[in-house]
Image: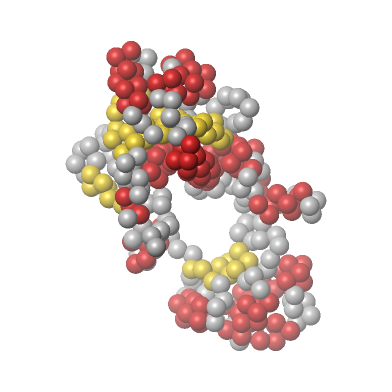
Amino acid sequence: MQHNFFKDLQVIELASVLAGPAVGQFFSELGATVIKIENKNTDGDITRKWKLATEDANKEYSAYYCSVNWNKHVMQVDLRNSAEKKEILDLIVDADIVISNFKLNSAKKMGVDFESLKKVNPELIFGQINAFPNGEERPAFDIVLQAEAGFLFMNGDADRPPVRMPVALIDILTAHQLKEGLLMALLHKERTGNGSYVETSLLESAIASLANQATNWLIGNQIPQRMGSQHPNIAPYGDIFQTKDRKDIVLAIGTENQFTKLCMCLNQSNLARDPDFDTNAKRVKNRANLNQILSVAVQQFDRDFLFQNLTANQVPVGRIFKMDEVFDQPTNQALLLEQRMSDGELVKSVKTVAFRMYNS
């Protein structure tokens, strides 16, 4: 039932790039009819042209585009053309949701802002994504928000420049914020029959996701610094070690019991009772010395053997996989989608819906 939950819902997507289309794909994966409106004057969504050097330059789409545009009905139109605009407005008359990331002034000029569209459909739910709150309309892609929300400064190694997160995470976080707001609006509409205007911004979504790094400053008065994959509050957590067969693992030790079991698995039981390492606070303080000891211990084992032993003892450990290794894992195959593109090619992408719901 989950994949068909929104089978009677019609969504119009006036959005491009990643955040807005990710919201559209969420509804598409759950059975909604999603009509994606692209600007034909720019040959469609800009991400169609965001291709890897290895991709076919003549294709009408990129791998990036395929990541968030599964199973949508695509229309390329010119909204400044009155006939083509009327065609879209006719669709909006019967739509449940419109998703937009148009700049507010541009949307108003074209007559596809919320105030204009609710005259066409008074019960419409309108989801708006902005780059910044309070009407600021300067252009911004994900890395700009990573910079201004503090993520870029925190990310990377201590002795190196800031590093961009390799996924446009701010867009993904913003998509989740808008999805949550739209689900609330659907519930409100079911209860009252009234539509809603739901608005979020990339910056607000990023700030709302700072979690403990924000409170480390707000409460602890410590500005988070670049630490690679390490954690400022826990050790060993995010610390990477190479095994005997030259493969990498990462540890995520969150409790004293887990540290004791880690030491046992590494044949270093005395380490758990060492006065320099017998509490998390001491391990954070003495992380460098601890990691030297753990590095030598881990190198005595092959990765698969150590992984199985640690996992059997409930010690949190991760194997550092490349993308091909990620999708070699059988459980991850269930998260793949397929679709036939306009040129007839069958392509794969990853689901954006990773929950299951069972009706009682």
Which residue occupies the extreme front position in the image?
192
The reply, left or right, for residue 162 in relation to residue 69 is: right
Q: Residue at x 64, y 54 (%)?
A: 157
Q: Is residue 79 above or below residue 181?
A: above
Q: How many marks?
A: 0
Please provide percent x and percent y for residue 218: 77, 48
Say which of 57 and 97 sits in front. 97
Q: Is residue 88 above or below residue 312?
A: above
Say which of 248 and 18 sits in front. 18
Q: Is residue 218 visible?
A: yes
Q: Residue at x 37, y 14 (%)?
A: 80
Q: Is residue 40 visible?
A: no
Please provide percent x and percent y for residue 235: 68, 68
Say which of 219 and 43 sits in front. 219
- Tell me where residue 16 sits by quadrant: top left
Q: Quadrant of the C terminus?
A: bottom left
Which residue occupies the extreme top position in the image?
82
Please provide percent x and percent y for residue 144: 58, 36
- Tell me where residue 135 sits by quadrant: top right
Please provide percent x and percent y for residue 3: 33, 52
Q: Quadrant of the N terminus?
A: bottom left
The reply, left or right, for residue 36 in relation to residue 166 is: left
Q: Is residue 360 above or below residue 309?
A: above
The reply, left or right, for residue 152 in relation to residue 303 is: right
Q: Residue at x 19, y 41 (%)?
A: 344
Say which of 31 and 263 sits in front. 31
